[in-house]
Image: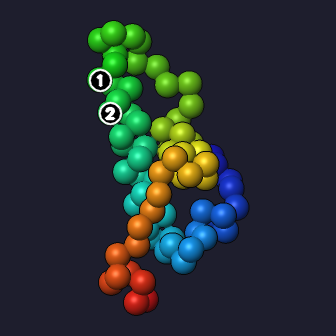
């Protein structure tokens, strides 16, 4: 289980909901890309897709954009 500090990930007023959705979408992208490569290589991920997605967001390789509707709440 990942146990990280959310404060760096929520900078700029990003909502927790948007963070959750962004991590889930990025994890699906990572998993799908690994699955597509399985014909060329083995379908093996050394780390879990969610862990990789969180890393991508923390290191700034992915950005999160809140919609205006979510920012109201």
Q: Which residue is mark 2?
A: 32
Label 2 SS: helix
Regarding residue 63, the answer to whether it shows in the image is yes
Task: Report the residue at 58% width, 69% height from top.
Answer: 10
Label disc, if present, on residue 36 of the rendered structure: 1
Q: Quadrant of residue 7?
A: bottom right
The image shows residue 19, relative to residue 13, as above or below, that is: above
The one nearer the camera, 24 or 10, is 10
Give the residue displayed 60% in from the left and 70% down from the top: 11
Q: Is residue 46 above or below residue 52?
A: above
Q: Name which residue lies at 56% across and 52% down.
A: 60
| Front position in the image: 1 or 64 | 64
User: Residue 28, position in %: x, y?
Assistant: 36, 42
Q: Position of residue 52 (x, y in %)?
A: 54, 40
Quick check: marks 1 and 2 in contact, CB under 8 Å?
yes
| Label 1: which secondary element | helix
């Amino acid at each position: 289980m990942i146990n990280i500090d959310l404060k760096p990930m929520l900078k700029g007023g990003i909502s927790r909901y948007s963070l959750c959705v962004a991590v889930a979408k990025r994890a699906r992208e990572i998993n799908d890309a690994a699955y597509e490569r399985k014909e060329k290589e083995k379908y093996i991920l050394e780390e879990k897709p969610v862990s990789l997605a969180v890393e991508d967001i923390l290191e700034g390789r992915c950005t999160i954009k809140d919609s205006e509707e979510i920012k109201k709440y």
